[in-house]
Image: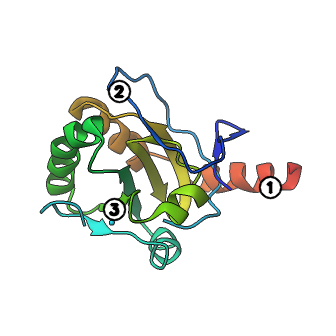
């Protein structure tokens, strides 16, 4: 299961909506082992329980936005996510509608929305609930691009050995 900074995320099917706030973050590798929708008219792909694993296992960078139509912060984040998807055409942007993909959202331990996850070469390198302002999202993308993936893989392997 996904972990949030080394701790299991809360279980259950209840998802609450995070309000927008300033973010102080750093990219830290996490280990993926789970499963995960086209939103509006942006350059994103719909991710479902059937397509999530194969999509995250592909090489490159994948951003995944977990959202719901009733979530106001999700709707406020949508233009930022859309603009980033248009600016960064070399990155895959995915979307998961938590109302339609409840099993996937639960498996991914998403308890607050919006939740943004970032994978690089199949490894979960970022996970955070709450929307990001445009500058913070661009900074995050830059950090993910600049990751030393050999070092990330080494850290994941060390963590797996300790587990």
Q: Are marks 3 and 2 in contact (CB under 8 Å)?
A: no
Left or right side of 86 for 98: right
Name the secondary structure under disc 1. Answer: helix
Residue furthest to the right = 162
Q: Nearer the viewer, residue 163 or 74?
A: 74
Q: Position of residue 2 (x, y in %)?
A: 64, 52
Please give the label number shown on residue 19. 2
Q: Is residue 107 above or below residue 17?
A: below
Q: Counting other residues with Cα less than 10 Å from the Cα at mark 2, is it few (<14), some (14-19), or many (20 or more)?
A: some
x, y (%) of residue 109? 59, 50
Q: Secondary structure at mark 2?
A: loop
78 or 151: nearer the eye? Answer: 78
Which residue matches tag 3? 94
Q: Which residue is mark 1?
A: 160
> In the image, 154: left or right of 43?
right
Work out whether mark 3 precedes mark 2 in sequence or the reverse, and give the earlier one: 2
**Quadrant of the frame with the N terminus:** bottom right
């Amino acid at each position: 299961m996904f972990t949030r900074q080394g701790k299991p995320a809360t279980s259950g099917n209840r998802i609450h909506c995070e309000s927008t706030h300033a973010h102080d973050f750093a990219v830290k590798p996490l280990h993926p082992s789970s499963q995960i929708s086209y939103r509006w008219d942006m350059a994103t792909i719909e991710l479902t329980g059937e397509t999530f694993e194969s999509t995250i296992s592909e090489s490159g960078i994948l951003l995944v936005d977990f959202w719901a139509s009733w979530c106001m912060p999700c709707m406020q984040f949508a233009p930022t996510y859309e603009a980033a998807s248009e600016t960064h055409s070399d990155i895959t942007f995915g979307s998961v509608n938590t109302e339609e993909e409840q099993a996937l959202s639960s498996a991914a331990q998403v308890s607050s929305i919006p939740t943004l996850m970032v994978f690089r070469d199949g490894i979960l390198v970022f996970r955070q609930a709450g929307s990001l302002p445009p500058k913070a999202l661009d900074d995050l993308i830059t950090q993910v691009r600049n990751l030393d993936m050999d070092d990330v893989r080494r850290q994941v392997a060390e963590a797996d050995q300790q587990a």
